[in-house]
Each structure stands twice: as C-alpha cells, then as structure tokens.
Image (cartoon, grey):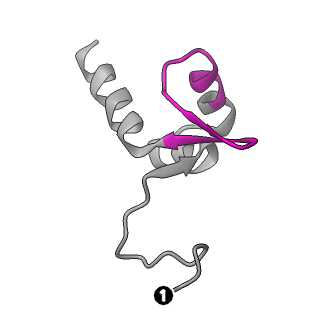
Amino acid sequence: MPPLHQVPASIPRVLLSVEEAAHALGLGRTFMYSLVARGSIQSVKCGRKRRIPMAALQEFVNHQLVD
C-alpha cells in the first residue's frame, strides 16, 4: 500500500486547495479567497488549511448558469 501522500492517479481527489480550485475555474487566487470568505463557494477547514470540495465547485458553476 502506498504512503498516504502518494495517492494513485486513479483515485479522484475530493478536496482541492484554494489555489487549485481557482486554477480549475480559471479564476485568480485572490478572487477565489473572496468567494470563499463571502460564502459563495463552500469550503472545509482541515487543521489550519482551507479546502474546497470538488462538489462545491460544480455547485458554484451550476448556480452561476441559473442566474
């Protein structure tokens, strides 16, 4: 079994860093942090780090399509 920090590529990631989430949406890091701060994108706190669930990114995009 591989160490926890070496997750096989076949296992999809569930949580992204704010920077990774910003890159996935084509947004800037600062703007992504502001979306998280105002609650437009849901996030979870893991220790001292903030993580964005992949489902929250899809929910944000779907909500933007409706408006």
Q: Position of residue 41 (x, y in %)?
A: 48, 26
Q: Taking 65 as reference, is 21 above or below it?
A: below
Q: Which of these two is toward me, 3 or 51?
A: 3
- Residue most extreme to the bottom: 1
Q: Quick one: label 1, few (<14), some, or many (20+) residues within 10 Å? A: few
Residue under the image location 38 percent in, 27 percent down: 60
User: Horizontally, is 24 left or right of 44 in the view?
Assistant: left
Dot 1 lies on which element? loop
User: Horizontally, is 11 left or right of 32 in the view?
Assistant: left
Q: Position of residue 12 (x, y in %)?
A: 37, 63
- Residue most extreme to the front: 1
Q: Which of these two is toward me, 9 or 67?
A: 9
Q: Which region of the structure is painted magenta?
A: 33-52
Q: Taking 46 as reference, is 42 above or below it?
A: above
Q: Which of these two is toward me, 46 or 61?
A: 46
**What is the quadrant of residue 47 in the picture?**
top right
Instruction: From the image, tell me which residue sits under label 1.
Output: 1
**What is the quadrant of residue 45 in the picture?**
top right
Residue under the image location 35 percent in, 40 percent down: 55
